[in-house]
Image: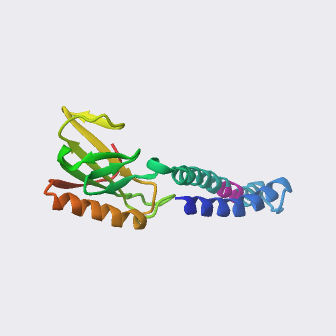
Amino acid sequence: MLDRGFKNLFFGFLMFLPGLYLVLHDLPRTSSYLSQIKISGMPLVVGAICIILGCIGTAKGLAGVARTGDNAIDLAASSRGITVRGGHTIPWDSISDVTSITYHNHAAIQITGDRADLNRALVLHLTDPMDLPNVRSRGGSPRLKIKLIHYPAIDYMPLFTKTEAEIARRRIPITSETKTQEM
């Protein structure tokens, strides 16, 4: 996300600065004032939009990079259980079943996303309530949702696949879902 944010910022300034120059210096002269506004304003508007998207992407990327220590762990599987953000380990015997979610971006125009970067999430259904942050209860069953959205798919897919394989090896039921947006 950080590299995409920097690219948007670069392209935004590349468009914004000439557009700003054209607006401030009233260039180029055309026979129609409406054409002059379009020619001068279009690079300015496109540049401003790219700068806004670049700032959002850069802020999100920097927030992900700034995480350190136990907060930098999104998902890790070990012999003791699954470790989630904050360094909290959920023992294997406290997981009753798992739902694997793939979020697809079916937007016609991909503004800040790439169709190859499919966001993933794991929902751990727990046998008993645990004293962990982000544990929610739905229908009396405690659940913990692990979102993997801070990195491109190429970075987290090996870890995600390894974790799914470990869940299957331990004979914990796993179901797959596909969603278009997070509910």
Does the segment drawn in magenta span residue 181? Answer: no
- Magenta stretch, main secondary structure, is helix
User: Residue 9 placed where, x, y %?
Assistant: 65, 59
The C terminus - image quarter: top left
Say whether residue 46 is magenta: yes
Left or right: where 36 falls relative to 86: right
Q: Which residues are magenta?
A: 42-47
Left or right, 180 with respect to 40, comes to left
Viewed as shown, does residue 165 lie left or right of 6? left
Q: Residue at x 34, y 56 (%)?
A: 76
View extreme (top): residue: 140
Q: How many marks?
A: 0
- For residue 155, above or below residue 69: below
**Residue at figure coordinates x 22%, y 61% from the top left:** 166
Residue under the image location 33 percent in, 50 percent down:
83
Front residue of this view, candidates 109 and 155: 155
Q: Nearer the viewer, residue 129 or 144?
A: 129
Q: Examine the rendered structure and indicate whether residue 18 appears above or below residue 55.
A: below
Observer-nearest of 76 and 21: 76
Q: Residue furthest front?
A: 80
The x, y position of residue 162, in whole percent, is 28, 64
x and y percentages locating residue 39 in the rendered image: 73, 61
Instruction: Say which quarter of the image contains residue 35.
Output: bottom right
Q: Position of residue 104 (x, y in %)?
A: 35, 58
What colour scheme has been applied to the protein in the rendered image?
A: rainbow
